[in-house]
Amino acid sequence: MKKRFGILTALLCVPIWPLLAIAGDFDGSKPLVCTVIEASECIMGEGCETVAPEEINLPRYLWVNVGQKTVQDKKAGDDARKTQIQSVKQVDAKLILQGAEQGREDVRDGFGWTIAIMEDTGQMVLSAAGDLVAVAAFGTCTPY
């Protein structure tokens, strides 16, 4: 009887093992490349509209390296735009990354941003807010 229970328990756990391995890919332990699929821009008094990421200077691909605390628009190179991750938290099965950018010198275009990556699927939500403008973008991440 104990042997049957042990085998039954092992068989019931087998379908969970692959999910546990996948979940580890999106917890910040591995570098990720995230693809922006859809984006919206909201401007106070004008409402929100769906835009192509390029229209709002948002890269289509984001290379996220939690270990190095960076998000950049190209995998490597001196000409890659790069931002520092200032906060990393794991909340309710989501990897939450946050930062802020000054923007261009002598222009009031600084903003704060958050990237939330679902640890079980790799789906991503990016939000950014500045002077009376907000951006929401949705996408998916994969380890590289």
Image: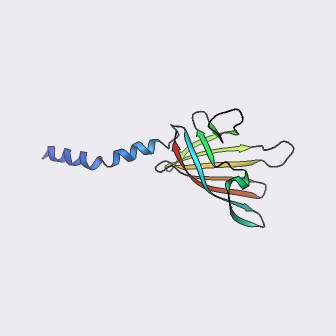
Where residue 139 appears, x then y in whole percent? 57, 53
- Residue 15 left/right relative to 102: left
- Residue 121 left/right relative to 72: left
Where residue 112 appears, x then y in whole percent? 71, 48
- Residue 5 left/right relative to 136: left
Quick check: 114 above or below 76? below
Picture colour scheme: rainbow
In the picture as drawn, the residue positioned furthest to the left comes out as 1
Where residue 118 appears, x then y in whole percent? 51, 50
Labels in figure, total: 0
141 or 119, which lies in front?
141
Please report the residue visible at 67 percent of the width from the left and 54 percent of the height from the top.
53
Please report the residue visible at 64 percent of the width from the left and 34 percent of the height from the top.
76
In the picture as drawn, the residue positioned furthest to the right comes out as 106
Where residue 15 appears, x then y in whole percent? 32, 49
- Tell me which corner region of the image, top left, top right, bottom left or bottom right, holds residue 73: top right
Please report the residue visible at 79 percent of the width from the left and 55 percent of the height from the top.
131
- Tell me which corner region of the image, top left, top right, bottom left or bottom right, holds residue 62: top right
37 or 136, which lies in front?
37
Please report the residue visible at 55 percent of the width from the left and 41 percent of the height from the top.
32
